[in-house]
Image (tube, helix red, strand yellow):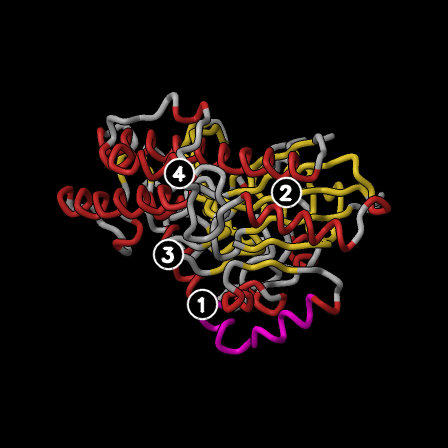
């Protein structure tokens, strides 16, 4: 980790968990510097080793704010995260035929990408639905069809094995379309609010609400419910998958990596924004996935205060989605996965280059750079992949 603090350009320091500034793309660096200028940013800005350019705030960024919340510092996919289950099934009980059958059953049962369930879904998460918030109320009927569905892009279901040949199931998904709708709706409102209040900002992309304002409270409530929905979405899919493979979980882990929450850091209660970052309290168990076809890790947080008890959420992008599709042939990705003996089922194979190994940073290097933030407990290698 190193620190950048130019008092002529920054209000507060920027701490980066990388070896040098050269490892951070220019766009992400500019976005991080914008964060250091915010009047309400507290203590310092933390950038995780998987950081790359996002919208407004870098993905892999951590921001502590005093009585302020930024929709774009949470992200579009509110509550996006991981769920991992360790099962009793061993590698010796798994054949290629069994894997292919399980993948087919999952594809038949769990809608992917733009697909939804035809019937409305039931879950306790709908019991405390904040229907007084207009954007949520307008989408309620659609939301009930989206529970238990796998998102597109980098979202996935993976079959994995640990070093003792135990089968794990890993799910990466978020709040589906409702998180995006909430994020975009409240960002537009935040822009208007900041213009009305004549707030000085380095960019409109960092428009914010004061947390104790009516708008701030409404966004916080909507965002918090989207987190609950996201967790319920992963929970529902995992329940379906475990039922399909006939297993009960021996261990279950679920984490968000796009969210904001009230937390205490350095003796002050702040709005802690983690955009593509994992909460890594001392002793907390988490999940850090690799790129498609590479290993993932189950980790334990070390509770490092300088990172605001945070860590990287994955390998981090090296190539943008469009760039990856332009320079990496689909056939190359499929051949690489075949050579590794990993079957892949994708709703849209044209998007597979976005998730190729070459599109991401080296996860082991990322883990080395954050060795003061987390401890590796278990290494998992993929044996089958279902993509959204």
Q: Locate residue 106, reporting x and y percent.
A: 60, 46
Cβ atoms at labels 2 and 3 below 8 Å apart: no
Q: Which residue is mark 1?
A: 26
Q: Earlier in the sequence, mark 2 or mark 3?
A: 3
Identified at 45% across, 23% down, the residue is: 124
Q: Earlier in the sequence, mark 2 or mark 1?
A: 1
Whether residue 341 is situated above or below residue 122 in the rendered picture: below
Whether residue 193 is situated above or below residue 7 in the rendered picture: above
Whether residue 278 is situated above or below residue 352 in the rendered picture: above
- Residue 335 lies in the magenta stretch: yes
- Residue 293 lies in the magenta stretch: no
Q: Nearer the viewer, mark 2 or mark 1?
A: 2
Q: Residues within 10 Å of mark 3 (few under 14, many from 20)?
A: some
- Span colored in magenta: 320-337
Q: Earlier in the sequence, mark 4 or mark 2?
A: 4
Main SS of the magenta part reads helix
Q: CA distance from mark 2 to mark 1?
A: 28 Å
Q: CA distance from mark 2 to mark 3?
A: 24 Å
In this view of the protein, which residue sits in the foreground, 131 or 323? 131
- Circle number at residue 145: 4
> From this viewpoint, is residue 301 visible?
no
Q: Which residue is mark 3?
A: 55
């Amino acid at each position: 980790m190193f620190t950048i603090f130019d008092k002529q350009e920054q209000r507060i320091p920027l701490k980066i968990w990388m070896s040098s500034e050269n490892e951070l793309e220019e766009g992400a660096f500019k976005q991080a510097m914008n964060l250091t200028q915010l009047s309400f940013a507290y203590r310092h800005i933390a950038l995780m080793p998987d950081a790359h350019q996002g919208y407004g705030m870098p993905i892999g960024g951590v921001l502590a704010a005093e009585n302020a919340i930024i929709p774009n510092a949470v992200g579009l996919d509110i509550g996006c995260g991981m769920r991992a289950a360790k099962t009793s099934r061993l590698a010796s009980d798994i054949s290629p035929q069994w894997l292919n059958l399980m993948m087919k059953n999952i594809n038949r049962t769990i809608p992917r990408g733009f697909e939804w369930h035809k019937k409305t879904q039931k879950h306790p998460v709908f019991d405390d639905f904040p229907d007084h918030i207009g954007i949520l109320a307008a989408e309620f009927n659609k939301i009930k069809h989206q529970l238990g569905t796998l998102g597109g892009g980098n979202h996935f279901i993976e079959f994995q094995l640990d070093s003792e040949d135990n089968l794990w199931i890993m799910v990466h998904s978020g709040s589906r379309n409702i998180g995006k709708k909430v994020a975009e709706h409240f960002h537009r409102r935040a822009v208007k609010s900041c213009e009305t209040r004549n707030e000085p900002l380095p960019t409109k992309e960092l428009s914010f609400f004061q947390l104790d304002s009516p708008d701030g409270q409404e966004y916080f409530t909507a965002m918090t419910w989207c987190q609950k929905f996201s967790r319920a979405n992963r929970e529902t899919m995992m329940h379906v998958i475990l039922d399909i493979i006939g297993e009960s979980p021996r261990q279950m882990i679920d984490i968000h990596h796009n969210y904001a929450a009230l937390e205490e850091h350095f003796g002050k209660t702040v709005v802690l924004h983690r955009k593509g970052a994992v909460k890594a309290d001392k002793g907390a168990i988490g999940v850090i996935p690799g790129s498609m076809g590479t290993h993932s890790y189950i980790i334990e947080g070390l509770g490092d205060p300088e990172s605001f008890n945070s860590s990287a959420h994955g390998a981090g992008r090296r190539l943008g989605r469009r760039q990856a599709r332009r320079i990496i042939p689909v056939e190359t990705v499929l051949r690489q996965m075949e050579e590794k003996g990993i079957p892949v089922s994708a709703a849209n194979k044209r998007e597979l280059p976005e998730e190729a190994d070459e599109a991401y940073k080296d996860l082991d290097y990322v883990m080395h750079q954050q060795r003061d933030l987390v401890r590796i407990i278990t290494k998992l290698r993929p044996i089958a992949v279902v993509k959204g």
